Image (spheres, rainbow, N blue to C red):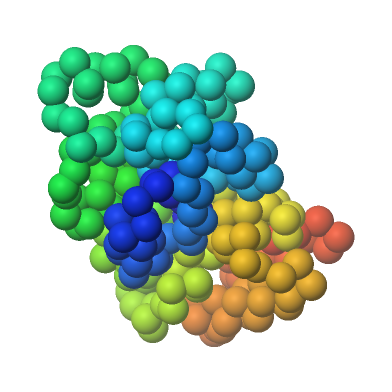
Amino acid sequence: MRVLVVEDEPRMAALIRQGLEEDDYAVDEVDNGPEVFDWVESAAYDLIVLDIMLPGIDGLTVCRELRARHHTMPILMLTARDAISDRVAGLDAGADDYLVKPFAIEELTARLRALARREGPSKTTQLQVGDLVLDTATKRARRGDRSIEPLTSKEYILLETLMRHSNQVLARDQIIDHVWNMEFESGSKLIEVYISSLRKKIDAGQDHKLIQTVRGLGYRISADE
């Protein structure tokens, strides 16, 4: 899943980025309020981590404006202020959750997983397509009684993205939006490489191939023939 981190304090931003990447998120960073709107128009973010105290435009105003522009991705707001009135202001601005600094990275990632479940088709930690099950808490997958060999970080993000959009054809650009950050080179063949790798781990030896290529359109994962 792809996350936009909006934090102007470099050390805090670096800690958040490291923690999220270790938890298999694709991460972009911005350090001020005004630039947020350009970033969300250029990529389909699954989640936003938004600090309240920002240069240019504060996080509360950014959040309200994003909602006014009909951006519906979950927003987790960060602040050093823990007064009830501050929490209420953040939630009333359109935030989905609120975390007070300092915090443990483990709590931040757990809250983001909870927000993703709230938005997705499954309210549990498990995604399922046919006999393929992916546990988003443990990052482990199995097909039937067979455990899938450990997935790399990008394999996991790609598989989770496909399974959260099961039976839907995802174009190459849509996959890039959810799996890679702004550093992705548009001419790269990485998508094809990772699709091939996932097929070897998930579909090898199976009569029904779950990961399907739709010529000229993209890829999908489906239990349907």
Q: Residue furthest right?
A: 216
Q: Nearer the viewer, residue 135 or 111?
A: 111
Please name the residue shown 34% across and 32% down the image.
52
**Lateral position of residue 157 relative to residue 183, left or right:** left
Name the image quarter holding the C terminus: bottom right
Q: Which percent across, then down, holds residue 94?
A: 40, 21
For residue 117, above or below residue 20: above
Query: Does residue 119 appear in the picture of this structure?
Result: no
Q: Residue at x 45, y 22 (%)?
A: 61
Q: Farthest residue in the front direction? A: 55
Q: Quadrant of residue 197?
A: bottom right
Instruction: Return the x and y of residue 32 as percentages of the image width and height.
Output: 49, 41
**Count of marks, rendered view:** 0
Asked if residue 219 shows in the view, the reply is yes
What residue do we see at 27% from left, 59% from top? Answer: 137
| Whether residue 68 is situated above or below residue 80 in the rendered picture | above
Say whether residue 75 is left or right of residue 189. left
Q: Nearer the viewer, residue 23 or 28?
A: 28
The residue under the point 65% across, 68% down is 184
Return the x and y of residue 218 as percentages of the image width and height: 75, 59
x and y, in percent, of residue 66 in the image: 53, 26
In the foreground, 185 or 81: 81
- Judge by depth and name the residue closer to the eye, 57 or 197: 57
